[in-house]
Image (cartoon, rainbow, N blue to C red):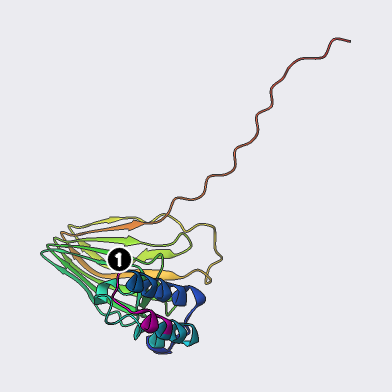
Amino acid sequence: MDSDVPARDLRASDADRDRVAEVLREAVVDGRLTAEEHAERLEGVFAARTLGELTVFTLDLLPEDKQPFQVEAGQVVALFGSHRQEGRWVVPGRVPVAAVFGKVEIDLREAILQHRHVVLDLSSLFGRVRLHVPGEVVVRFTGRSMAGSVKEPVPAWPAVPDGEAPVVELTGTLLLGSVEVIRPKPPKPPKRSRRFWTGRPNG
């Protein structure tokens, strides 16, 4: 999809509402919410129409990186450590990614792509970047690699006509760094049934 609508104003799906409802259920079970608070918030969850409206119900229950989804994605940075961006998050058209003597892991399998063409602007110095993508996404590396390594992504599956598949472009600079693209394995074709020759029946 291509949308200039602010991330908070994107329409929420039934699955998004279910994610928030599950967090509320766990909160009432372990005593962080009363039954009355749970009922009140749950009513608001199923009345919510946008992602921004949903975020308010769990802000005081989980830290930012554990929220059911993230609507304000910024840069992804790992400095002498590691950082993982995963789950249900809204991906803008361009995301700065920095890995300096560290490891960045970006998972797009449950993400919401605001644009059909997404650019990950890489800055890697002795860093590692691992990118998980759904099978239908096309990945292209157009950056510069100086003594770095890029594990070439395999073609998307199933085959998607040109111009219709989402594209993730990896640009920027790798200096003694590495990029690895990971996608699910294509499904195996069904096994053909074996037929055994038993010879002609005696007649």
In the image, residue 131 above or below residue 189 = below
Which quadrant of the view contains residue 174?
Answer: bottom left
Residue sitting at 69 percent across and 27 percent down? 195
- Where residue 113 sits, quadrant-wise, is bottom left
| Residue farthest to the right, as pictured | 203
Regarding mark 1 in the picture, which secondary structure is present there? strand
The image position of residue 125, as x and y in percent, is 14, 64
Q: Nearer the viewer, residue 41 or 162?
A: 41
Residue ranking furthest to the front? 35
In percent of the image, x 26 and y 73: which residue is there? 65
Establish if 142 lies above or below 52.
above
Compare residues 65 and 18 and report the one nearer the observer: 18
Q: Is residue 192 left or right of residue 71?
A: right
Q: Is residue 50 above or below residue 106?
A: below
For the point 29% across and 82% down, the residue is 59
Graded by Cα atoms within 10 Å as few (under 14), some (14 to 19) or many (20 or more), the crowding at tag 1 reads some
The mark tally for this picture is: 1
**Horizontal placement of 190 versus 38: left or right?**
right
Residue drawn 12% across and 62% down? Answer: 101
Residue 191 in percent (x, y) is at 60, 38
Residue 131: x and y in percent read 32, 62
Query: For the C terminus, which image quadrant?
Result: top right
Image quadrant assignment for residue 44: bottom left
Q: Which residue is mark 1?
A: 106
Residue 26 on the magenta span? no
Span of residues in magenta:
30-39
Q: Position of residue 177 (x, y in %)?
A: 18, 60
Give the answer, above or below, for where 167 lies relative to 44. above
**Relative to the observer, which residue lies in front, 73 or 46?**
46
